[in-house]
Image (tube, coloured by chain):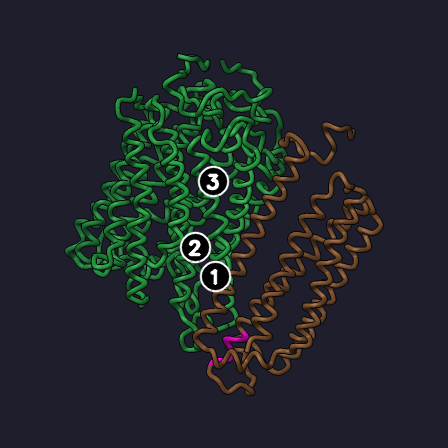
Amino acid sequence: MSSSASVNYLNEFKGIKSWLFTLDHKRIGVMYLFGVMISFLLGGVFAVVIRLELLNPGMDFITADTYNQMFTLHGAVMIFLFIIPAIPAALGNFVLPLMIGAKDVAFPRLNLASWYIYVIGAVFALYSIVAGAVDTGWTFYAPYSTTTSTSVISMTLGAFTLGFSSIFTGVNFIATVHKLRTPGMTWFKMPLMVWALYATAVIQILATPVLGITLVLLILERAFGIGIFDAAMGGDPVLFQHFFWFYSHPAVYIMVLPGMGIISELIATFSQKKIFGYKLIAYSSMAIALISFLVWGHHMFTSGQSELASVVFSFLTFFVGIPSGVKMFNWMATMYKGRIKLDSPMLWAMSFMFLFAIGGFTGIMLGAISIDIHMHDTYFVVAHFHYTMMGGTVIAFFGGLHYWWPKIWGRMYNETLAKISVFLVFIGFNMTFFTQFFLGSQGMPRRYYNYLDKFQPLHAFSSYGSWVLAAGFVLMAYYLIHSLYKGEKAPNNPWGALSLEWQTQSPPVHHNFEGEVVLDHDPYDYDTRMVIDDKLIKK
Amino acid sequence: MEHAEHPSYLQHHFADSQQQEETAKLGMWIFLLTEVLLFGGLFAFYAIYRAWHPEMFVEAHKVLDIPMGALNTFVLITSSLTMALSIRAMQVNNKKQTIWLLVATLLLAATFLVIKYFEYSHKFHLGQLPGKYYTYEGITAANPHIFFSIYFTMTGLHGLHVVIGMAVITWVLIRTIKNNFSSEYYTPIEMTGLYWHLVDLIWIFLFPLLYLIG
């Protein structure tokens, strides 16, 4: 169906200026994609360095101070520059207007501004890496962050700036979903990815300003000694933790909710079956968004918070697991008796379900105070959040990237290599991080440069895993970049999906759709509709 | 160019100007919500430290200049009135009146900052400063510098919002002079008004909390 000389958003305007001043949500999404992929590479290099150093106890090739900087930079870059913007700002920007049949997001200039603010934030972060990299951990806990000699201010200023970029995306998405849906698309006819992005945007606008003000106070504390986080001056360092986690716990749902949205799309499309429990999946996204604001205290069970508060936070933490469980069961029920196609995006989705289940269950374990007292600040926690953040969000992100890649670029990638890549990442990931559950439960503390000899075999195994993981990503980079130049032309609807973004050409035209958008079915009507050769037909 | 279906101010991705206006308003209200949360963090700090050091807060608040603060409250409320009237003037296509009312709003905002400057410089002179710069000796309760840390952070961030508001008002003033607006389309003035009222409203909370409550 795709004519070889078709005009599309990529080739209609040419030159670097047509990109730098573009107001097109698709181009801004692509520019974000470049930003987050470069950040992922950078954060990944830090990770490999960390694992390499931990191959043996004692010093292998970097000093303890450099090691502290490495894990801080790995965390800060991966969280603030990669994982928070990866799905909403890069993929979400591209697909949200397409999925609701709109021509653009509500505020295209604000959208472009958010990208520039992202770049400015990245520059602050990079500056802090060059000028005496931070060594506080990505959480910037006072009082260490107010006293260390490394460049805390530029990194926190970077995180503060990136927060505004995130807020602007959130404002834009909420207004877009409310006001720009194509006629006929009611709330319960929206694809679940749109629900997930909407729930994410709610957290982005409610939580991020609080992080902003907290980081401002941290900067003032460090620069002018205002005493708010300094116990010697009548302040309270634990208050920083409260304010930090008031943002940062909801923020983990900024990271994982849009990933769950992607999984809903992938499971339905590749099972070719009406999604099971549509409304419950939609409501569970909103439930996660709301409950996520009430659980931050589970990061402070051992920080001297009152016992009553800990018990309440522990209970609420179990509670937030329910909507995630609802989603898992709905996805499985969707697959049940579906016509499952094992294309690479579906393999990513199935990896997600497996890994996120482990991440979720260990999260419930850590939410139990009695276990957390023993496990806190060990590798068990490290393994848990990598299973949710990497096994969850990052895997979902790559699933989405492979799913929408043909739409974004109009090219197909090499499917065989893609399957090998999923396989390598899945194996490498489990080698690296499942090992760390054992390390943690045996008492290996997180963020330590050195360790007892008895931990060496497990540490080494984890490091070998990181190489397998890296190999999977290098392979992916190879075939994805290769596909841009040599890839087969993609059809408009390679996966036979029913949501609107597949009803326009690949890549889409500048205004997204030729003519009026016709909406005569729901996004998951696989029982009454099917796609053959890009044509939507009634069964 | 301007005919009924496609006025020049209508952006390509909206179906009509009503949709554009409603979207802009929704976006602005969401943005204001983020501003409330930004200040909300500081109000929470205020509440927590007030609960921890009640005697100190009572003693420290007495050094603030109530007449100056009251005058500033009056100035800001008046500026909100002129801002609201400028929108009204554009609704009835009275461009000249819109311009004068926006200029009046700017002048009142500047007056607010000048009064604030005098208050600040007096405190600098006496050493009633945040954290480690605090040198004033007139307060006997422990940790009085915390009060001034909170005072300067809250009023400073508010002052920054006044400056940003002035920049935005100047921008809509220039666009008004350039004939960008009419009774058909005045959304940017209206949005600026919403923002300005929020800046005003935050001060209306700051004034009693910092200056008046004993």
Q: Which residues are magenta?
A: B143-148
On the image, numbered disc 1 is attached to which residue?
A214
- Tell me the colour chain A is drawn in: green
Tag 3: residue type? Tyr
Please, what is the three-letter code of the amino acid marked with disc 2? Tyr
A126 relative to A348 in the view: left or right: right
Q: Residue at x 77, y 41 (%)?
A: B183
Q: Which residue is mark 2?
A: A247
Where does residue A348 sit, x and y in percent of width and height?
32, 32
Using a 10 Å C-alpha cutoff, classify the residue at mark 1 as few (fewer than 14 neighbours), some (14 to 19) or many (20 or more): many
Query: At 21% across and 57% down in the image, what residue appears?
Result: A371
Q: Is residue A509 above or below residue A121?
A: above
Check residue B4 in the rendering and tell me which mark sits there, or answer none.
none
B49 relative to A270 in the view: left or right:
right
Residue type pointed to by label 1 = Thr
Check disc 3 and report the residue beneath it. A198
Front of the two marks 3 and 2: 3
**Cα distance in 3D space between marks 1 and 3:** 25 Å
| Residue A410 in the image: above or below residue A49 | above
Q: Is residue A489 visible?
A: no
User: Is label 3 in a helix, a strand or a loop?
Assistant: helix
Query: Can residue A282 be found in the magenta stretch?
Result: no
